Image (tube, rainbow, N blue to C red):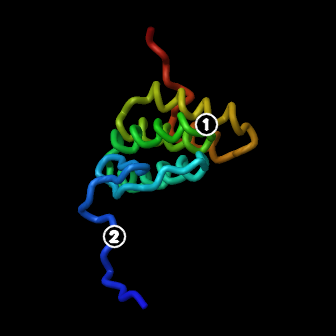
Amino acid sequence: MTKNTGKRADSGTKAAKGQISISGSPAKPLSDDRGMWEKYLHSEAAHPSRTGRFRDAVDLLYKAVTIDDQPYLHHDLSRAFRGLGELDKALDQITKAIALAALVPDYYDFRAASGLRWVIHRG
């Protein structure tokens, strides 16, 4: 029987072969299940977004989008860009979310409540 010391086995160690560490997070095993990796990155982006570290959230969410292009990732990117004050990018991301999932009313509500449909693109 193993005693639970409350410490993670990988804390304080470098990533071993076959593991990845992203922005100081504990090393996570590589997996063939890309959907799980995308969900991991999406969940890792939640804390920076809630604490106002929107640039960190954007970085993690972009990594997740490259793995699996999901509408909720674009929605969260839109929220992060809005937090950064980059409204043209926020509008672009919410538009992508709507294109991928046109029947999700929350995306339209977010766009309307944020005033994003009134953003003028400058070229």
Q: Secondary structure at mark 1?
A: loop
Q: Nearer the viewer, residue 26 or 77?
A: 26
Q: Badge 2, how many Cα within 10 Å: few under 14, some, many 20+? A: few
Residue drawn 57% across and 34% down? 94
Q: Nearer the viewer, residue 109 or 58?
A: 58
Residue 80, image x, y percentages: 42, 41
Position of residue 19 in the picture relative to residue 99 (left or right):
left
Q: Kindly report which numbered mark, 2 or 1, lies closer to the viewer in this rendering.
A: 2
Position of residue 105 in the picture relative to residue 26 (left or right):
right
Residue 92, image x, y percentages: 54, 27
Hey, which residue is sitting farthest right in the picture? 103
- Looking at the picture, does residue 123 appear above or below residue 77? above
What residue is pinned by disc 1?
Answer: 69
Residue drawn 28% across and 65% down? 11
Residue drawn 52% across and 29% down? 91
Q: Quadrant of residue 60?
A: top left
Residue drawn 33% across and 55% down? 25
Quick one: label 2 or label 1, which is nearer the N terminus? 2
Q: Amino acid at mark 1?
A: Asp
Q: Are marks 2 and 1 in contact (CB under 8 Å)?
A: no
Residue 17, image x, y percentages: 38, 49
Q: Badge 1, how many Cα within 10 Å: few under 14, some, many 20+? A: some
Q: How many numbered discs sit on the rendered protein? A: 2
Q: Amino acid at mark 2?
A: Ala
Q: Secondary structure at mark 2?
A: loop
Residue 5, image x, y percentages: 31, 83
Q: Nearer the viewer, residue 51 or 6?
A: 6
- Looking at the picture, does residue 14 appear above or below residue 104? below
What residue is pinned by disc 2?
Answer: 9
- Looking at the picture, does residue 86 appear above or below residue 123? below
